[in-house]
Image (cartoon, rainbow, N blue to C red):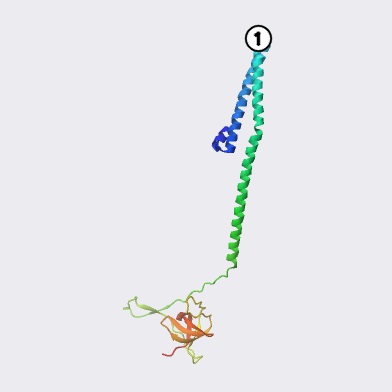
C-alpha cells in the first residue's frame, strides 16, 4: 500500500493516505508479531512453572500484557483515522465526478455544434458540375510555330430562322464577372457584336452583356 502511495506521490491526498495507512498497518503487524512471541514465551514458562522461578513467569506475563496493550492501542488508532481516510477518499471521488461532469458538458456542446454543422451542410443546395466544351484542333501547315496545328472552334451550321443575327445556347452559362450575360441551354440570344475570337456581345430578355463564343451555336451570323 505504501509503495503505491509513493508512486502516486505523497503530496497528493490519495497518495499520502495510502502511505499513512500502509505505515500504520506495518506497525500493527510488528506489534502483533511481538505479542505472539511474548505469548509463546509466557506459555512455555507457565508450563515449566515449578522448574523455573515464579519471578520469571510473572515477568513474562507482564511483558505479554504490555505487548497486548500496545497492539490494541495501535489497532484502535488505525480505526480512529478511518474517518479521515474515508474523507480523503470521498474528496477524490468527488473530484473525479466533477471532472467527468465537465467532460460531459464539453462533449455535449461539441456534439451540438457538429450536429448544427452537419444540418447546415445537408441543407445547402448541391451544384452540378458542367464541363466546358473542348476546343477542336484544326491541323494546319507543319511550319507553324505551335507544332503544326492551331485550335479553332468548329463552325456552326448556318440556318436562316431569323433576319436578325442570333445564336442558340448550347450550355448553361452563369456569369462570374460584371457585364457578362447569363443564359440557359436552348435560349436564343440576339447578337450585337463580336468582341474578339472568344467573346460575343448580345441581348436576352431585355438584358445585354458578354458571353463566351464556345457556349453557343451561331444561327444567323453577324454582318461583316
Q: Give the image quarter of residue 72.
A: top right
Q: Which of 134 and 212 is in front in this view?
A: 212
10 Å crowding of disc 1: few (<14), some (14-19), many (20+): few
Q: Quadrant of the C terminus?
A: bottom left
Image quarter of residue 27: top right
Query: In the image, is 139 to the left or to the right of 114?
Result: left
Q: Which of 191 and 206 is in front in this view?
A: 206
**How many dots with numbers?**
1
> At which x and y percent is residue 131?
49, 74
Q: Nearer the viewer, residue 8 or 198?
A: 8
Residue extending farthest to the left is 143
Q: Position of residue 205 (x, y in %)?
A: 54, 85
What secondary structure is found at the residue carrying circle 1?
Answer: helix
**Residue 204: x and y, percent?**
52, 84
Above or below: residue 218 compared with residue 31: below
Q: Is residue 130 left or right of residue 95?
A: left
Q: Which of 158 and 82 is in front in this view?
A: 82
Residue drawn 63% across the image and 49% down it: 101
Tell me which residue sits at (66%, 31%) in the image. 80
Residue with the most extreme bottom position: 163
Q: Residue at x 60, y 27 (%)?
A: 26
Question: On the rendered image, what quadrant is the N terminus found in?
Answer: top right
- Residue at 63% x, 46% y is 97
Q: Mark 1 points at which residue?
A: 55
Amino acid at each position: 500500500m505504501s509503495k503505491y502511495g509513493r508512486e502516486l506521490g505523497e503530496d497528493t491526498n490519495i497518495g499520502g493516505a495510502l502511505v499513512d495507512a500502509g505505515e500504520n498497518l506495518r506497525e500493527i503487524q510488528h506489534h502483533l508479531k511481538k505479542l505472539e512471541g511474548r505469548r509463546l514465551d509466557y506459555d512455555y514458562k507457565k508450563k515449566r512453572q515449578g522448574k523455573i522461578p515464579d519471578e520469571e513467569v510473572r515477568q513474562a506475563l507482564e511483558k505479554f500484557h504490555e505487548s497486548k496493550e500496545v497492539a490494541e492501542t495501535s489497532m484502535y488508532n488505525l480505526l480512529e483515522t478511518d474517518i479521515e481516510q474515508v474523507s480523503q477518499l470521498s474528496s477524490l471521488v468527488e473530484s473525479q465526478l466533477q471532472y467527468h461532469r465537465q467532460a460531459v458538458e464539453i462533449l455535449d456542446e461539441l456534439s451540438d455544434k457538429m450536429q448544427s454543422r452537419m444540418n447546415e451542410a445537408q441543407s445547402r443546395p448541391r451544384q452540378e458540375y458542367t464541363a466546358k466544351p473542348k476546343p477542336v484542333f484544326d491541323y494546319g501547315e507543319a511550319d507553324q510555330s505551335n507544332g503544326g496545328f492551331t485550335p479553332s472552334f468548329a463552325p456552326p451550321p448556318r440556318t436562316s430562322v431569323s433576319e436578325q443575327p442570333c445564336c442558340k445556347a448550347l450550355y448553361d452559362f452563369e456569369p462570374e464577372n460584371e457585364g457578362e450575360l447569363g443564359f440557359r441551354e436552348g435560349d436564343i440570344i440576339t447578337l450585337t457584336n463580336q468582341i474578339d475570337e472568344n467573346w460575343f456581345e448580345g441581348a436576352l430578355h431585355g438584358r445585354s452583356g458578354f458571353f463566351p463564343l464556345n457556349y453557343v451555336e451561331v444561327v444567323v451570323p453577324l454582318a461583316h
